[in-house]
Image (cartoon, helix red, strand yellow):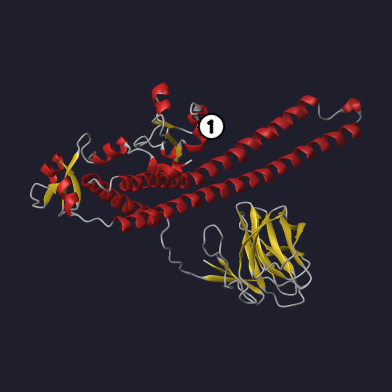
Amino acid sequence: MATSAASRDSDVVKYDCCTICEKERSVEVYAEFYCKRCLTYFCRTCINSHRQHGWWFNKKYPYGMDKIMKWPLSTKMESSLFACVIHKGQKLKMYCRYHSELCCSRCVERYHRQCIQVTTLTLAGTRTLTDFKNLSVRTENTLLQIKQCQIHQEDRVKSLNVSYNEHERLIVDGMRLNIISFLLLCETSTVNKGHKHIQYTVNEMREKIKNLLADFEKSTVKENKIELTIKKAPLMSVRYRCIRFHYELFHLHVFIQKVRDKSDLSFIASKKCQEKIQLSDTFLKETFPNHVLTVNGKSEYYVRIPSDSDTCWISGACVLPDRQVMVADGSNNNKVKLLDQQYQMVSHCDVAAHIEDMCLITPSEVAVAVDDDDTHEVQFITVTQRQLVTGRKLLLQHSCKGIAHYQGDLLIADGNALFKYSLSGKQVCRLYQDRSDTWTDSQTSGRWDVKSRKPSWITYSSVDWVKCSV
């Protein structure tokens, strides 16, 4: 995936290309295999037809990306290293120690004429002691951070797609109800008035339904798709930049390991690797800056209702896309409550036991962690037309103290261990366990989003109020 995305940029040099694609199709496709026996590079497609080495081919050949250190030295990489980025077509020949810059002859003539510390690359390579071990560690750490950034962007895109699909499904359901209501109206009118006085002809019904579908597609689906595209655009842009940085830095890292015995090549590669690390660090800091959250004010809203038998204890909260807020009353009231955009109570529903936690599953559905001595379950609750509707339950064999939704799975904590469940209720695995104490999960004030690692804007208290900070 990284390879194909990196090739989208026309100025990205593909260092190792499939030999067959280049010769037979005149296209550059990134190679993922190298055959030592026939000295040929192969992409993922062409490797499937390469079987002339018989049974031993699959045993010993070819070398995949996991053995890229056994690939021959990339001539394209070597050429790109010597290419001056300022003066196209010029080769790097000199190094200015004063400015710490690699230079071609035109660079020296134009920018470094007065510098007295300009030497040849060969001399600079022999006189400069590069800490390759430290550089390798820095490179690997940067590569890891870039990959994590890329995965984070991809997760956000997936989350947007899931939210869009769910929102579209709800809209389609609403449109279907409108059509059914119209057909029922037509049927009722036909039965009441008799066949001689049919109010809606077949053609009229067809036109009416076509108009409903056309209005739905124009006003709703198209607008949502445009909005989705706009939201995804900056995420995809960051993702492509991550792929490119990772691609270029990874190949510099590999190249340095292969040319450490060549002073001029290793010197240029190490300098460019350090520059790429600095650029990557700047990019990562700009993409994920250390934000300082400032509370400009707060408002308090009363959430107690007459049927509550105990003081409210807000143990969880979720903000829906339409800015309605669902709060979990974790006291003996055992209720989930729905607040509208003005934080007025509009609906509530009861659950079987004490509410420990709550998380958003879809734009209109939450999963509630319900737990006491005898009850360990996850209750799903849906918002339908400003009303809370209880749905299915997942019965657990262990306590349910915390819950989060991540990439289509549920993460459930029992106080000592963290489990991964599918939404259907199947336990996938146990991710972590620590029985060094009775309770080893950390309890913090406020809530944290599992994807963005950012605190939510709602805090909870053990009184009958919800505090909203801005």
Image x and y of residue 450, in percent = 56, 60
| Closest to the observer, 245 or 239 | 245
Q: Can see residue 342? A: no
Callout 1: SS:
helix
Q: Residue 39 is drawn in which quadrant? A: top left
Q: Viewed as shown, does residue 441 lie left or right of 88?
A: right
Image x and y of residue 288, in percent = 43, 57
| Closest to the observer, 198 or 299 | 299
Q: Is residue 68 above or below residue 319?
A: above
Q: Which residue is mark 1?
A: 55
Q: Viewed as shown, does residue 446 lie left or right of 112?
A: right
Image x and y of residue 135, in percent = 32, 56
Q: How many marks?
A: 1
Q: Residue 203 is drawn in which quadrant? A: top right
Q: Residue furthest front?
A: 56
Image x and y of residue 390, in percent = 77, 58
Q: Is residue 61 above or below residue 297?
A: above
Q: Is residue 127 above or below residue 398?
A: above
Amino acid type assigned to the residue bearing label 1 in the image:
Trp
Q: Residue furthest top?
A: 24
Q: Residue at x 62, y 77 (%)?
A: 437
| Closest to the observer, 266 or 470 | 266
Q: Can see residue 181? A: yes
Q: Residue at x 77, y 66 (%)?
A: 350
- Label 1: few (<14), some (14–19) or many (≥20) C-alpha neighbours in 10 Å: few
